[in-house]
């Protein structure tokens, strides 16, 4: 079997890898129908997040169960399943409280940019779809594994309510699906911060009512102008830099809520502005497993089409081009087909 391995900055290879096998009785083996490149994969690809050895890549996945360990009860061979990028048992106290990404046995999924994948803790991680999906649903179902689940958590953590005003900081796939999530949750106004025309158009298609292209103080001033000087009820921070977090804090109204899901890099948050703004902060790695059943059903019923964030589709063996296209912002998100 061949799989994707990162050797260093901008050095991504598709090379021979051992084929996954059942290692523990709680494992499942999937034959993937689709996988993709995540925006968070670009941090190590660019060398911002250091790696000290060749690293198998990929954590978004959906496909058919080929085999299960002797203790797996909730999924079986032949079922089409989707799993979270965080492996969880879904039974520990943290999981029962809805935070499977903080599971006592949690580990981050990897090695999913390959045709076959071993999923640990299959019972707690995988959810079966209502049946075998048609091919045109695969992109949208794949988003549930991470990018839609993460955008949904950003909106949930930001306390988006019907009729409220939401600001989305970041126009990558997570930010765009944060727009979609806020729309589904009933936000009355959704302000997407974006400078990229194609991404602005998709944000509007997903439900954005306003686009703000300014950044920094000018961006905050524009948001205050749109909100009668108050700021937004909810802000979704979907980037992970110090600038984006401060943009979020300053864009929120006094007592507003910020859902932060951007993986932090180079961030040293100055707390005094946060203190003065009286904002609620909630975020971290998205507990996607909590949302999987409902999001799968929304996609299955064709009530949402999050798969539109994939604007480049490539065969899996061209994964290096998928990384380059996203790194150079020629693509929002790359879908890979084994």
Image (tube, grey):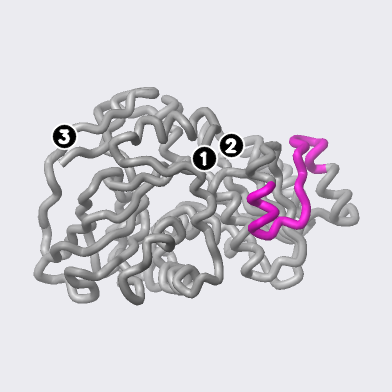
Distance of label 1 from label 2 (alpha carbons): 6 Å
- Which x, y percent locates residue 72? 17, 71
Q: Badge 2: few (under 14), some or many (20 or more) residues near its Cα, within 10 Å?
A: some
- Local SS, label 1: loop
Please identify the quadrant where the N terminus is shown: top left
Q: Earlier in the sequence, mark 3 or mark 2?
A: 3
Q: Is residue 57 above or below residue 118?
A: above
Q: Earlier in the sequence, mark 1 or mark 3?
A: 3
| Callout 1 touching callout 3 (CB < 8 Å) | no
Task: Name the outermost residue toward the front.
Answer: 135
Q: Badge 3: few (under 14), some or many (20 or more) residues near its Cα, within 10 Å?
A: few
Quadrant of res 137 = bottom left
Distance of label 3 from label 2 (alpha carbons): 35 Å
- Which x, y percent locates residue 306? 52, 58
User: In front of the other: label 1 or label 3?
Assistant: 3
Tell me, yes or no, if residue 132 can be seen here.
yes
Quadrant of res 188 = bottom right
Lateral position of residue 287 relative to residue 193, left or right: left
Q: Residue at x 11, y 53 (%)?
A: 21
Q: Earlier in the sequence, mark 1 or mark 2?
A: 2
Q: Which mark is residue 264?
A: 1
Distance of label 1 from label 3 (alpha carbons): 32 Å
- Local SS, label 3: strand
- Local SS, label 2: loop
| Callout 1 touching callout 2 (CB < 8 Å) | yes
- Which x, y percent locates residue 78? 20, 69
- Which x, y percent locates residue 129? 35, 72
- For label 3, the residue is 16
Q: Which residues are magenta?
A: 201-220
- For label 2, the residue is 241
């Amino acid at each position: 079997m061949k799989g994707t391995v990162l050797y260093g900055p901008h050095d991504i290879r598709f090379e021979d890898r051992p084929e996954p096998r059942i290692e523990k009785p709680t494992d499942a083996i999937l034959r993937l129908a689709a996988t993709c490149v995540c925006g968070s994969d670009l941090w190590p690809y660019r060398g911002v997040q250091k790696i000290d050895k060749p690293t198998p890549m990929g954590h978004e996945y959906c496909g058919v169960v080929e085999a299960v360990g002797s203790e797996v009860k909730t999924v079986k061979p032949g079922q089409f399943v989707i799993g979270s990028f965080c492996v969880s048992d879904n039974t520990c106290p943290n999981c029962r409280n809805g935070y499977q990404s903080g599971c006592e046995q949690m580990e981050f999924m990897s090695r999913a940019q390959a045709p076959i994948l071993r999923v640990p803790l299959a019972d707690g991680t995988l959810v079966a779809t209502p049946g075998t999906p048609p091919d045109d649903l695969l992109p949208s179902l794949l988003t549930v594994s991470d990018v839609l689940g993460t955008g949904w958590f950003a909106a949930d953590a930001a306390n988006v309510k019907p009729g409220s005003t939401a600001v989305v900081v970041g126009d990558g796939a997570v930010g765009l699906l944060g727009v979609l999530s806020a729309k589904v949750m009933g936000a009355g106004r959704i302000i997407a911060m974006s400078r990229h025309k194609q991404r602005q158009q998709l944000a509007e298609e997903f439900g954005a009512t306003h686009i703000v292209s300014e950044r920094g103080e000018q961006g905050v001033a524009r948001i205050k102008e749109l909100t009668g000087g108050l700021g937004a009820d909810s802000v979704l921070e979907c980037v992970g830099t110090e600038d984006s977090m401060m943009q979020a804090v300053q864009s929120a109204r006094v007592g507003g809520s910020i859902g932060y899901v951007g993986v932090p890099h180079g961030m040293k948050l100055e707390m005094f502005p946060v203190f003065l703004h009286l904002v609620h902060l909630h975020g971290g790695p998205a507990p996607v497993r909590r949302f999987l059943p409902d999001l799968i059903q929304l996609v299955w019923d064709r009530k949402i089409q999050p798969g539109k964030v994939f604007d480049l589709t490539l065969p899996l063996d061209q994964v290096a081009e998928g990384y380059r296209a996203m790194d150079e912002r020629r693509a929002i998100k790359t879908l890979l087909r084994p």
